Image (cartoon, grey):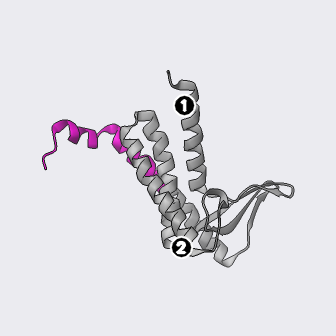
């Protein structure tokens, strides 16, 4: 198969390389934080940060923020397949997007790849950021969830505010 000069330049473009770097940055940051928390919490209890934030390891078999957590194998594998399919779809969107959208999709992809990695290796995703006010606790989440959420929010803002119709 012969690759045209334009195709080759598009594959190794500055936008593509930047997107790959963002994906790897998010993935590596997620791996470092999760690995550190797992090692720490194997020997200790939760970490009290302040009256609103604790670091406490929770193994999540569901999707983001612990939603749809089930012990049943079929649900777990179905959710994993959906997440994998979503990642493939994001890669497609990334290939068609403009530079800003590529960066935003890359944030989501890096986080999704981090969580999928955990699902494949640990059969659960380690969540550890416990935000709370008094006795009301938000869903426990991780760094990957932050980047996924940030990417989605910024895509919505970009689409609603900055896109010309």
Left or right of 38: which side holds 27? left
For label 2, the SS is loop
Q: Is residue 161 above or below residue 42?
A: above
Q: In this picture, which residue range is highlighted in magenta?
A: 1-27
Q: Position of residue 25 (x, y in %)?
A: 46, 52
For label 1, the SS is helix
Can you tell which quarter of the image residue 161 is in?
top right
Numbered mark located on residue 56 in the image = none
Residue 12 can be seen in this image: no
Q: Is residue 52 above or below residue 165?
A: below
Q: Where is residue 130 in the image (x, y as percent from the top left)?
A: 73, 59
Can residue 15 be found in the magenta stretch? yes
Q: Where is residue 144 in the image (x, y as percent from the top left)?
A: 56, 55
The rendered magenta stretch, by its main secondary structure, is classed as: helix
Q: Name the residue under label 1.
A: 158
Q: Where is residue 106 in the image (x, y as percent from the top left)?
A: 46, 46
What's the residue at 44%, 50% (across, down)?
23
What's the residue at 59%, 54% (across, down)?
145
Name of the residue lying farthest toward the bottom: 43
Q: Mark 2 points at which residue?
A: 122
What's the residue at 56%, 69% (across, down)?
76
Left or right of 81: which side holds 13? left
In this view, the residue in front, 71 or 56, is 71
Left or right of 56: which side holds 73? left
Name of the residue lying farthest toward the right: 134
Name of the residue lying farthest toward the top: 164
What's the residue at 48%, 65% (across, down)?
117
């Amino acid at each position: 198969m012969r690759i045209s000069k334009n195709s080759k330049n598009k594959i190794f473009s500055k936008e593509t390389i930047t997107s790959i770097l963002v994906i790897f940055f998010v993935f590596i940051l997620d791996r470092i934080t999760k690995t550190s928390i797992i090692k720490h919490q194997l020997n200790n209890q939760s970490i009290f940060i302040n009256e609103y934030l604790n670091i406490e390891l929770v193994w999540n078999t569901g999707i983001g923020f612990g939603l749809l957590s089930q012990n049943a194998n079929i649900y777990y594998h179905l959710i994993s397949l959906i997440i994998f399919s979503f990642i493939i779809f994001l890669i497609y969107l990334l290939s068609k997007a403009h530079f800003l959208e590529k960066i935003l999709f890359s944030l989501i992809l890096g986080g999704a790849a981090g969580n999928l990695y955990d699902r494949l290796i640990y059969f659960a995703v380690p969540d550890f950021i416990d935000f709370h006010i008094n006795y009301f606790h938000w869903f426990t989440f991780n760094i990957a969830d932050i980047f996924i959420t940030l990417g989605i929010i910024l895509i919505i803002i970009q689409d609603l505010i900055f896109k010309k119709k």
